[in-house]
């Protein structure tokens, strides 16, 4: 199987992204809009790598698969159900375990490269 490479992820033109619609469980206004690119998915679709961009807004977030990501631009605040607040900013590398639950607030349009499995 060949390596999969996405060059210049930070500077890709958003016009080339696929529209992934609005978040599924918005909380108030504005409602965040998602877009991105999937650049690898294994045959059984249990692993996926891609680029995700999301506009400002707040929604309920329930992580179904382990997710590792690197934030290219923007910032967000994740508030876990137990009250723990995690601020995410450009340049940060993060991992959220499957089963994480809470609210996500995108403060400034965020772009990240990610892997879920």
Image (cartoon, grey):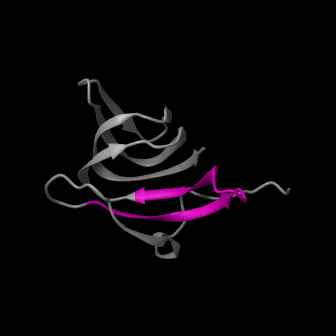
Rendered residue at 54%/61% (across/down):
11
User: Is 5 in the magenta?
Assistant: no
Would residue 110 be found to the left or right of residue 92 on screen? left
| Outermost residue toward the right in this view | 1
> Residue at image x 13%, y 55%?
28
Name the residue at 49% across, 38% down: 91
Q: Is residue 55 left or right of residue 28?
A: right
Residue drawn at point x = 28 percent, y = 24 percent? 84
- Pick the front one: 44 or 29: 44
Q: Quadrant of residue 61?
A: top left
Q: Is the magenta region chiefly helix, strand or loop?
A: strand
Residue range highlighted in magenta: 32-53
Residue 85 relative to residue 36: left or right: left
Provide residue 102's location: percent of width, then percent of height. Answer: 29, 37
In this rendering, is residue 79 above or below 10? above
**The C terminus lies in which quarter of the figure?**
top right
């Amino acid at each position: 199987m060949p390596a999969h490479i996405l060059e210049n992820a930070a500077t890709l033109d958003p016009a080339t992204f696929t529209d992934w619609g609005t978040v599924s469980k918005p909380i108030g206004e504005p409602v965040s809009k998602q877009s991105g690119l999937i650049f690898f998915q294994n045959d059984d679709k249990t692993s996926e790598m891609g680029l995700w961009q999301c506009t400002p807004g707040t929604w309920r977030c329930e992580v179904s698969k382990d997710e590792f990501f690197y934030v290219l631009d923007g910032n967000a605040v994740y508030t876990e159900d137990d009250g723990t607040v995690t601020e995410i900013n450009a340049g940060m590398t993060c991992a959220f375990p499957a089963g994480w639950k809470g609210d996500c607030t995108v403060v400034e349009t965020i772009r990240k490269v990610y892997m879920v499995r």
